[in-house]
Amino acid sequence: MDATSCSELLFQTKFTASHPHKLYRKFSRSCSQTTSLSGSSSQARTYLSIDSTIKRTGNVGGPYVCGPAQKRSVVGKTFCAVGVSPYGENVAEYQPHLHAAEDKVGVLLLNLGGPETLHDVQPFLFNLFADPDIIRLPRLFRFLQWPLAKLISVLRAPKSKEGYAAIGGGSPLRKITDEQAHALKMALEKKNLPVNVYVGMRYWYPFTEEAVQQVCFTPFSNGLPLMGYFLAWR
Ligand SMILES: C=CC1=C(C)c2cc3[nH]c(cc4nc(cc5[nH]c(cc1n2)c(C)c5CCC(=O)O)C(CCC(=O)O)=C4C)c(C)c3C=C
Ligand SMILES: [Fe+2]
């Protein structure tokens, strides 16, 4: 992925520095640092399969183009990964070249996330309620978004903690998503389709930005399918 397409991806995922969610996000590198990693290749494909919910909320909704980059190993651990193959059963028919060992496909699974510990509950709720797609205030009152998010999250956290405590102390969402990612990776490998799978969450770790950073440091000669899906959370 080159730097331009990477920053376009980040831009279109609407995670700007001013986004309130960032209050509870830690990042070590910016995507623009991938400039030096960019390379050239004759092949560049992008596969998109974005959940309509994501399109609607605008979390991820543009035609992201993840171009090819130089061959290099994945930096850091591969985020849990798994999702749904965009190729269907007859993937080899469509992309016979994917069988070449050097061809890598990345799959980014997008979900919402949940607090992993009781300690995470209040900041998670803040991220949720600070999202104008969850609570939309009239333009005149937008400045109240964060204070309101803080207020609601602090007020609601004790009750939510009770609920999470009753189901083991946190949301199962990440574990389930990681398991799905692993299962997808295994299923595609069985079809002789080696993939890197990533998980990005909107409201908690691993945040979509982190997953995108991982993607930015990975060479994909065949593009990146974006898979959005959501588990029932109630
Ligand atoms: C008025 C309260 C809430 C609105 C409106 C709301 C909308 C909304 N929520 C999600 C996604 C998630 N919500 C999750 C947890 C959660 N949501 C609320 C409240 C509202 N959500 C609370 C209080 C909580 C904490 C849990 C609880 O106490 O019930 C989660 C996390 C699920 C998990 O596995 O932990 C998600 C995801 C969306 C998409 C949405 C509006 C479109
Ligand atoms: Fe919710």
Image: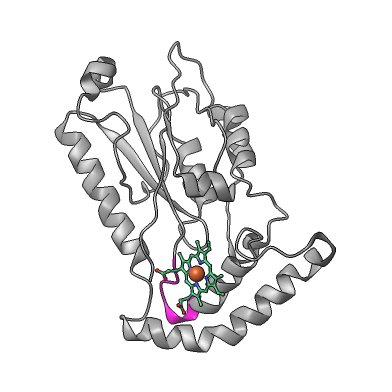
- Residue positioned 42% across, 26% down in the render: 223
Residue 57 in picture, x, y percent from top left: 57, 51
Q: Residue furthest top?
A: 42
**Residue 35 visible to the viewer:** yes
Picture quarter with the C terminus: bottom left
Give coordinates of residue 142: x percent, y percent: 78, 64
- Left or right of residue 105, residue 50 in this image: right
Give the camera-side residue of 213 and 73: 213
**Residue at image x 47%, y 22%?**
68
Q: Position of residue 100 (x, y in %)?
A: 25, 19
Scheme by which the image is coloured: one colour
Left/right placement of residue 161 relative to residue 122 reads left
Magenta segment = 114-120
Is 32 or 201 nearer to us in this picture?
201
Picture quadrant of residue 118 = bottom left
Magenta stretch encompasses residue 196: no
Going by the image, does 181 lie left or right of 71?
Answer: left
Instruction: Answer with the quarter of the image where residue 147 lies.
Output: bottom right
Q: Residue 110, how many percent across, how many down?
A: 44, 49
Residue 6, relative to residue 176: is it above or below? above
Residue extending furthest toward the right = 140
Observer-nearest residue: 197 or 41? 197
Residue 59 visible at all: no
So how many labels did they put on this image?
0
On the picture, is 24 further left or further right than 144?
left
